[in-house]
Image (tube, grey):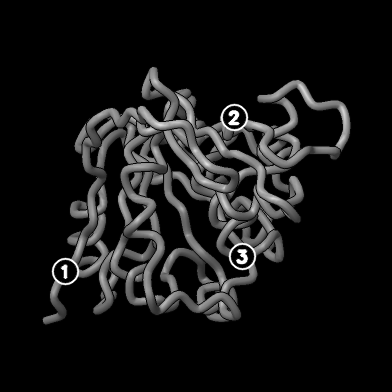
C-alpha cells in the first residue's frame, strides 16, 4: 500500500518589516497585509510578475500604472502577495525540488459534485472505489469550509511526486494536465468567493509563475462529455483572466 501524503494549509503569523529595503528586496508592509517589491536595475514588469506568480495587469491595477514604464527604486504593491492570501500558506509545498516544467501543458478545473470533502476523504474514496493505487486523482483540492477551510488549498501527493493525474478519462491529458478540484456541487450551488479567489491565486502562480504562461486553462466539460465543474462555475470569468 502506498504511503498517503497530504500537505495541508498552515496558518501563518503576520510578518512585519522595520528596515528600509534596498532595491530588489521584498518585504511585507508594516500592516502585515501587502508585499512590496522595490525595483532593481534591469527589471521589467513581466520579470517581476513571473517572480511573484501574478499577472502584469494585476500589478498595474494595484499600483495605478497606465503603461509598462517603471524606475529603479520604485516600490510596487504585489497583489496576492500577502501573508493572509490562500496561496501563501502552501507556496513552499508547491515549489517542489523535482518540479517537471516540461511535463505540464494544461490546468483543468473540476468540482467534486459533493457537498463536502477534502484531500484525505477523496484520496480514500479513489483508492477504495476507483481502484487508484496512487490515490487522490487531483493535484490540488480547494476546500469549501466543510472538512477543510473555505478556500484552503491542499497539495496532493501527485503534485509533490510530479506524477500523472487521475482526474479525466483521457490518459494523454492525465499525463500532461494539472487537476484542481473545488469541493462542492456547482450544478446546484455556487463556489464560495474564497474558493474562487484561492483558485485564481493558484492558477496565476502555476500558469504565470511556475510555467511561464505556457499552459492552457480549461474546465473539465471543455475536454470531455460531462457537466463538471457545473453550470454555476464562473468559467467565462476565469477564461478572461487566463485565456
Q: Going from the N terminus, do you reach mark 2 or mark 3 first?
A: 2
Counting every numbered tag in the picture gives 3
Closer to us: mark 2 or mark 3? 2
Disc 3 designates what residue? 211
Confirm or deny contact between disc 2 and disc 3 (CB under 8 A). Answer: no
Residue 16 x, y percent position in the rendering: 33, 28
Residue 236 x, y percent position in the rendering: 72, 36
Q: Going from the N terminus, do you reach mark 2 or mark 1 first?
A: 1
Closer to us: mark 2 or mark 1? 2
Residue sitting at x 30%, y 31%? 15
Q: In this view, does 14 lie to the left or right of 58?
A: left
Element under disc 1: loop
Residue sitting at x 47%, y 23%? 193
Disc 2 designates what residue? 77
Between 166 and 215, which is closer to the camera in this rendering?
215
Element under disc 3: loop
- Give above or below for 132 relative to 34: below
Residue sitting at x 72%, y 41%? 72
Residue 45 x, y percent position in the rendering: 74, 45
Element under disc 2: strand
The span from disc 2 to disc 3 (Cα, nearest Å) is 23 Å
Residue 195 x, y percent position in the rendering: 43, 33
Confirm or deny contact between disc 2 and disc 1 (CB under 8 A). Answer: no
Closer to us: mark 1 or mark 3? 3
Disc 1 designates what residue? 4
Which class describes the residues within 10 Å of circle 3: few (<14), some (14-19), or many (20+)?
many
Which class describes the residues within 10 Å of circle 2: few (<14), some (14-19), or many (20+)?
many
Q: Is residue 76 left or right of residue 144?
A: right
Q: Going from the N terminus, do you reach mark 1 or mark 3 first?
A: 1
Amino acid at each position: 500500500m502506498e504511503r498517503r501524503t497530504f500537505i495541508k494549509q498552515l496558518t501563518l503569523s503576520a510578518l512585519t518589516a522595520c528596515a528600509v529595503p534596498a532595491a530588489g528586496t521584498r518585504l511585507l508592509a508594516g500592516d502585515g497585509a501587502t508585499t512590496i517589491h522595490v525595483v532593481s536595475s534591469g527589471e521589467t514588469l513581466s520579470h517581476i510578475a513571473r517572480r511573484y506568480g501574478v499577472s502584469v495587469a494585476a500589478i498595474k491595477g494595484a499600483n495605478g500604472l497606465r503603461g509598462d514604464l517603471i524606475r529603479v527604486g520604485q516600490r510596487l504593491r504585489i497583489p496576492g502577495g500577502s501573508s493572509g492570501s490562500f496561496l501563501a500558506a502552501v507556496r513552499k509545498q508547491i515549489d517542489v525540488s523535482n518540479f517537471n516544467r516540461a511535463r505540464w501543458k494544461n490546468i483543468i478545473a473540476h468540482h467534486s459534485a459533493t457537498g463536502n470533502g477534502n484531500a484525505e476523504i477523496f484520496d480514500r474514496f479513489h483508492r477504495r472505489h476507483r481502484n487508484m493505487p496512487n490515490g487522490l486523482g487531483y493535484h490540488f483540492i480547494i476546500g469549501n469550509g466543510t472538512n477543510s477551510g473555505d478556500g484552503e488549498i491542499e497539495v496532493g501527493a501527485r503534485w509533490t511526486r510530479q506524477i500523472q493525474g487521475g482526474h479525466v478519462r483521457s490518459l494523454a491529458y492525465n499525463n500532461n494536465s494539472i487537476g484542481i478540484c473545488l469541493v462542492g456541487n456547482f450544478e446546484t450551488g455556487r463556489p464560495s468567493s474564497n474558493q474562487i479567489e484561492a483558485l485564481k491565486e493558484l492558477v496565476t502562480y502555476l500558469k504565470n509563475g511556475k510555467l511561464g504562461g505556457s499552459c492552457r486553462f480549461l474546465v473539465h466539460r471543455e475536454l470531455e462529455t460531462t457537466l463538471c465543474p457545473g453550470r454555476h462555475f464562473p468559467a467565462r470569468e476565469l477564461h478572461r483572466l487566463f485565456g
